[in-house]
Amino acid sequence: MATAQPTVTLKQISADIAEKYDLSKKLANEILGDTLVTMIVKNLKKGNRIRIAGLGILQVKKRAARMGRNPATGEAIQIPAKKKIAFRAAKELKEAVGK
């Protein structure tokens, strides 16, 4: 049986950054949790791609409307068009995790 992977939160990452750079936890959390996330969301809403060196690219992609099936009844249904957020990992990240 597989064991559950631990989850690291943004708050924990900001606490590590605060310790490394001798900042208050509150300031590091505000910069990372509030400002960074807000800026990423704002730019994605505008349709901008976000490239984070060493990590990857975030961008909004449009999915066209399509036909699907209700798995319970087998009935054909129309799935509406929508936007999704796509992440493409950077080569450095793939290499680091793949080892």
Image (spheres, rainbow, N blue to C red):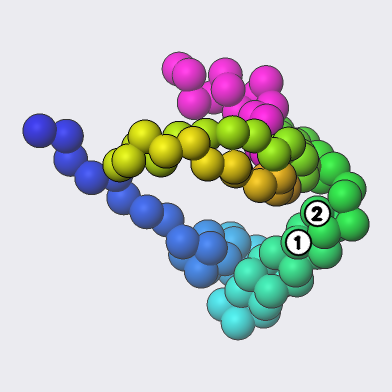
The residue singled out by tag 2 in the image is 44
Q: Which quadrant holds the N terminus?
A: top left
For the residue pair 74 and 71, the one nearer the viewer reads as: 74
Residue situated furthest left in the rendering? 1
Query: Residue 7 shows which numbered tag?
Result: none
Q: Which class describes the residues within 10 Å of circle 1: few (<14), some (14-19), or many (20+)?
A: few
Secondary-structure class at tag 2: helix
When asked about the image quadrant of residue 64, the answer is top right
Residue 41, numbered circle:
1
Q: Are marks 1 and 2 in contact (CB under 8 Å)?
A: yes
Magenta run includes residue 88:
yes
Asked which secondary structure carries label 1, the reply is helix
Q: CA distance from mark 1 to mark 2?
A: 5 Å
Q: Is residue 49 magenta?
A: no
Residue type for callout 2: Leu
State which region is magenta: 86-99
Image quadrant of residue 32? bottom right
- Residue 68's place in the image compared with 92, above or below, is below
The answer to whether one can see residue 19 in this image is no
Q: Residue at x 57, y 66 (%)?
A: 14
Q: Position of residue 83 (x, y in %)?
A: 72, 47
Residue 82 placement (x, y as % from top left): 70, 48
Q: Residue at x 82, y 64 (%)?
A: 42
Residue at x 46% of width, y 61% of height: 9
Position above or below: 96 against 70? above
Quadrant of the image for the C terminus? Answer: top left
Res. 67 image quadrant: top right
